[in-house]
């Protein structure tokens, strides 16, 4: 296996699928790399492109020749990385498909023996509610020229048209392990005391762990979650309304709800298993033990369920202020 694929850490199954296809000369005409962001999907897509184009190590990719270097740098004419646009709903316009993507697929490769089209955030580029661009690409995606490969990357493949998904071979990328995330943060010189909260809130994503570790952001979110818990326990309507309003209007509402949910999961685990409980926030074990003694496992678990129900409602465009008030005032 080349160093390019070895650099995709924590994805042994996905990388095995890709490298086996290369070794057997059975590369699919279109792939759908499914999984969370920040786990190596785009790095794997570029490694696959290098393997397809590399003249030094065909079907492997040396990673050091001018072809591989240009692919990695985004400067090779036979590898196009097509990202969502910045404005509006961010979906790719049908004109872009007709004027840029389809001509590339028809006439490439221009220099190498193969060509690749890579679509990061494919579910954003081709969402089911804006199907024009996806429909314009369907026939080419199903029957591309032999030398052209499509690689779609998606965090939410269910948002793609079923006809798009059915034309791609799926390769699943898993969330990264806690141990690997700790290693990645250590390699980026994140202080040890800042890692636990960042890793817990990252949900297996390296990009999110690094972002949350910046300037103690994860610890700050945890402190906000503890303030919400304190307000609820005070049973003072004014305090609850205040934190509900802050939560509803927060730019970080989703990750703050996630933090609160993980906190109550830890409380429930501490109540059930005591000192042997696996915790998302082990550096808060004393606090969690005290909280478990007052709240109990059943009530903590019920709060986790209430947070999940509220998160689902917000995903269906529920009013944030009403949703936060209803959640916090009905916590058991």
Image: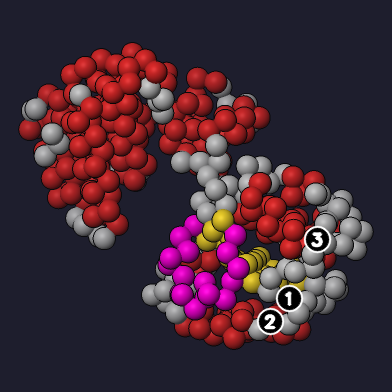
Total marks placed: 3
Mark 3 surroundings within 10 Å by alpha-carbon count, few (fewer than 14), some (14 through 19), many (20 or more): few
Say if mark 3 contacts mark 2, CB within 8 Å: no
SS at mark 1? strand
Mark 1 surroundings within 10 Å by alpha-carbon count, few (fewer than 14), some (14 through 19), many (20 or more): many
Point out residue 286 in the picture as x, y percentages from the top left corner: 33, 13
SS at mark 2? loop
Identify the residue at image location x=74%, y=63%: 21
Residue that carries the numbered disc 1 in the rendered image? 148
Mark 3 or mark 2, which has the lower sequence index? 3
Left or right: 219 as drawn, with respect to 189: left
Q: Is residue 280 above or below residue 3?
A: above
Looking at the picture, tell me which residue is in the foreground, 62 or 76: 62
Q: Marks 2 and 1, how far apart in space?
A: 6 Å
Residue that carries the numbered disc 3 in the rendered image? 23
Point out residue 122 in the picture as x, y percentages from the top left corner: 53, 66
Image colouring = secondary structure
Looking at the picture, tell me which residue is in the foreground, 23 or 294: 23
Q: Is residue 138 above or below residue 238?
A: below
Residue that carries the numbered disc 2 in the rendered image? 144
Mark 3 or mark 1, which has the lower sequence index? 3
Identify the mark at residue 26; answer none if there is no mark. none
- Span highlighted in magenta in the image: 155-171
């Amino acid at each position: 296996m080349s160093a390019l694929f070895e650099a995709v850490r924590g994805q042994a199954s996905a990388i095995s699928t890709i490298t086996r296809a290369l070794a057997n000369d059975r590369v699919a005409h279109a792939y759908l790399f499914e999984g969370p962001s920040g786990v190596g999907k785009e790095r794997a897509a570029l490694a696959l492109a290098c393997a397809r184009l590399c003249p030094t190590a065909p079907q492997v990719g040396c990673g050091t020749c001018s072809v591989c270097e240009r692919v990695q740098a985004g400067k090779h004419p036979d590898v196009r990385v097509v990202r969502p646009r910045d404005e509006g709903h961010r979906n790719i316009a049908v004109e872009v498909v007709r004027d840029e993507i389809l001509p590339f697929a028809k006439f490439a490769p221009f220099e190498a023996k193969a060509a690749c089209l890579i679509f990061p955030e494919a579910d954003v580029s081709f969402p089911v509610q804006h199907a024009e661009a996806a429909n314009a690409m369907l026939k080419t995606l199903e029957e591309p020229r032999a030398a052209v490969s499509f690689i779609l990357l998606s965090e939410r493949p269910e948002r793609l048209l079923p006809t798009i998904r059915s034309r791609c071979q799926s390769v699943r990328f898993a969330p990264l392990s806690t141990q690997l995330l700790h290693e990645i943060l250590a390699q980026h010189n994140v202080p040890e005391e800042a890692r636990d909260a960042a890793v817990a809130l990252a949900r297996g994503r390296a990009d999110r762990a690094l972002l949350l570790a910046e300037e103690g952001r994860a610890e700050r979110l945890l402190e906000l979650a503890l303030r919400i818990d304190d307000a609820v326990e005070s049973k003072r309507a004014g305090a609850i309304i205040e934190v509900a309003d802050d939560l509803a209007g927060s730019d970080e509402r989703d990750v703050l709800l996630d933090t609160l949910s993980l906190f109550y999961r830890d409380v429930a685990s501490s109540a059930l298993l005591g000192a042997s409980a696996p915790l998302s926030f082990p550096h808060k074990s004393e606090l969690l033990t005290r909280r478990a003694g007052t709240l109990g496992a059943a009530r903590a678990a019920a709060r986790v369920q209430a947070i999940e129900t509220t998160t689902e409602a917000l995903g269906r465009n529920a009013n944030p202020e009403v949703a936060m008030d209803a959640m916090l005032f009905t916590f058991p």
